[in-house]
Image (cartoon, coloured by chain):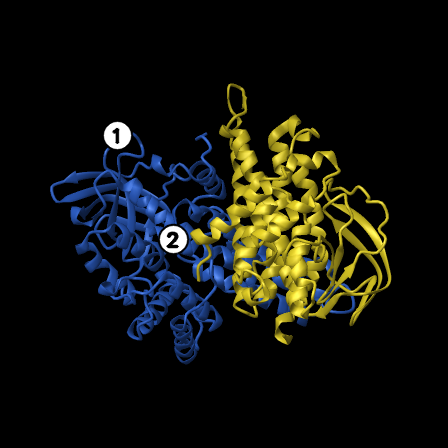
Amino acid sequence: MDGHLTKEDQEFAAEAREWLHANVPSEPRPPVPTDAREYDLAWQRTMYDAGWAGIAWPSEYGGRGSSLLHQIIWHEEYARADAPYVGVCFVGLNHGGPTIIARGSDEQKAEYLPPILRGEVVWCQGFSEPNAGSDLASLTTRGVVDGDDVVVTGQKIWTSYGNVADYQELLVRTDPTAPKHGGISWFICDMKTRGIEVRPIRTMADSPDFCEVFYDDVRIPMANLVGKLNDGWSVAKSTLSFERGTAYVAQQIDLARIVENIIEYAKSHKNRAGAGCVIDDDEVMRELATIRSEVTAMRALTYLMVTRAEVNGEPGPAGSMVRLFFTQLQQRVFRAAVHVMGRDAYQDVTNGTWPFYYLHSYSRTIAGGTKEIQRNIISERMLGLPRS
Amino acid sequence: MLLVPTPEQAAIAESAAAYLDSWFSLGDLRSETTAIPRAKWREAGELGLFGLGIPAEAGGIGLNTAEEVLVMRALGRKLATPNFVSTLLAAHAAHLTGSDLLAAILAGEVVVACSAQAYPDSVTIDGVEVSGTVDVFNGSIERPDYILVTSGSRFALVAVPELGPPVRSIDNGAFITSVELGSSEAVASGDDQAQYLRGLLYVSAMLTGIAEATRDASVNYVLSRSQYGKLIGTFQSIKHRCADMATAAEVALATTCYASVLFDEGDQAAWITALSAKQSSAHAALLNCRENIQNHGGIGFTYEHDAHLYLRRTHTLTELFGSRVENLAQLIDARSPLAST
């Protein structure tokens, strides 16, 4: 246990701060998905050109080849600079790419990783199905191997960025006779392939980019198989451990900044009930103090988890603890924001406002495995309790 | 930056736990008359427990707060007397002020009890003059030698005046006595928020230990108790409760460790992080103590079982260095006390 940041770490932080200060785009991220795609990719390209893409990714695929600690330092400086949300690049950078780094072949790494960092492609996830939610391994989208291709038929759902994506992490059942965890394979699916239809799904928050995807005899080259045939469940566990453990590091750090903004709001807005400011109410003050302490704890938990991921290569089941704590904390934070805003929260719920994030936060304890699934994983894989 | 203990750090914490096992087991608390054997306190001194974070040239071991915190966590797990917190802090108080008492504290010659409040209230510390009334938490049925009075950033080490009879508190191993200090002269006193911050860290570490111990007790029990023909640890309601306990303990551990490494680095964020460590560890300890009683069913409600002992100690420790409500107020009034030092 040692909190020392080396001179190199400090110089890295200073360099990142300086570059971000000079380069963060002044125009805000557009709310329309197709415009946002161009905006997000252009910003990713800008970071890539300056050597700031994929801090902890291997340098042979365009990354910086640095440590996860530097990745965190980067995210901290990124949040401090109020740099744009990662947006459509989320899946590729945070779990598609990391899965290929961990489980892909050399050819796949060379082909798919650099374009993610260069801001040329958007990735999405094809895991959940209408009848395979928490019981993900019961998925039935079929993949029949036919020569050099696998032919896919079925449906995926809850696919963020499906409407703007180029590639998808796709789980299909390639052996219907095997036990359910045994017959699944993990493919890279080109979203432009014939037979794919993407339809939007409207959400309670009116969040853009939410979709369902239909597959009708979609031919995917076998070269796109990641890991072994019928060993996709283990590859998916890697993907999910990234999704739960490290994918949200930037957002975890950014949450602290949001809490400070909420406190600032409560200090600068008059209390409707009487004299003074919103924060002068003891109940409000304690709610804000509690979330301030919790985002601080979140930061500590992120560091602990990253220390462990650095040692083990991926976050493992401990990522579920991070996920369980973080998603509920996000909900508490945006609930507090809405409490503090009072009636003003009902005026504007467009993308980017606190009330929008408040509504959106209801998805947090469902996506990436519900909080109940996270608790199952923690109790079974970390505490050694029996399967239910 | 490394948030997991090195093998050397883990070994130090293990040796502290082994030392405690040589004279104390938490079941002793059931007698409600636990005392600190003086010979064993001196043994702690010989082991260097009170001088872990005191520089070698001042007679200590010269390690960091990180090591102290890991030791406090190991002791907290076993419900060691809170006088470890106050005696360790007294060593720092004596060292900071250049007091002659340091050698005796490091040697385990003196037992120090704790009075720690967030805000100046009933006690005034003015130079070496200490006056007013304090509530003293003493983790022994016998009279301590000194009281470490902490009131916000001010602290004073005072020889114990006449103490009334120990009053049984909610914690059957910690006695709370209201002490009228009249106008006492402190053997050491000062004004340094780092002392208060250390107190927060030691208490957080003990609370984290309790959160971990009760998590482990529950996991062990639900893997051994059967109902309806299966282990109760098979039932999702129990599993999910255990998962929440594990997560709360992990958050407490991470925050306490992170706060201690920030403190050792002199980082401005140490203050808010230490307050957050106290919040998260007090939350985790209380949650886990509560759920641990529930997980044990009827047996968990008996005096014979250990479950209530953890709960009682959690309440005592949570009151030290500010109650929950006082710590929340400090979190919002976030001026860093390290800024002035």
Q: CA distance from mark 2 to mark 1?
A: 32 Å
The amino acid sitting under disc 1 is Ala
* Residue B340 higher or lower than B187, as above or below: below
User: In the image, residue B121 lies at what x, y percent?
Assistant: 81, 63
Using a 10 Å C-alpha cutoff, classify the residue at mark 1 as few (fewer than 14 neighbours), some (14 to 19) or many (20 or more). Answer: few
The amino acid sitting under disc 2 is Ala
Chain letter for mark 2? A
Asked whether disc 2 touches disc 1, contact meaning CB atoms under 8 Å apart, the reply is no
Please give the label number shown on residue A363: none
Q: Residue at x 30, y 56 (%)?
A: A97
Q: Nearer the viewer, residue A313 or A157?
A: A313
Chain letter for the blue colouring in the rendering: A
* Residue A17 higher or lower than A304, as above or below: below
Chain B image colour: yellow
In this picture, residue B311 sits left or right of residue B135: left
Mark 1 lies on a secondary structure that is: loop
In this picture, residue A277 sits left or right of residue A51: right
Q: Residue at x 27, y 41 (%)?
A: A232
User: In the image, residue B173 lies at what x, y percent?
Assistant: 72, 42
- Name the quadrant containing residue A135: top left
| Residue B336 in view in this figure | no
- Name the quadrant containing residue A143: top left
* Residue B232 higher or lower than B182, as above or below: above
Please give the label number shown on residue A309: 2
Q: Nearer the viewer, residue B323 or A251?
A: B323
Label located before the other in sequence (2 or 1): 1
Please give the label number shown on residue A178: 1
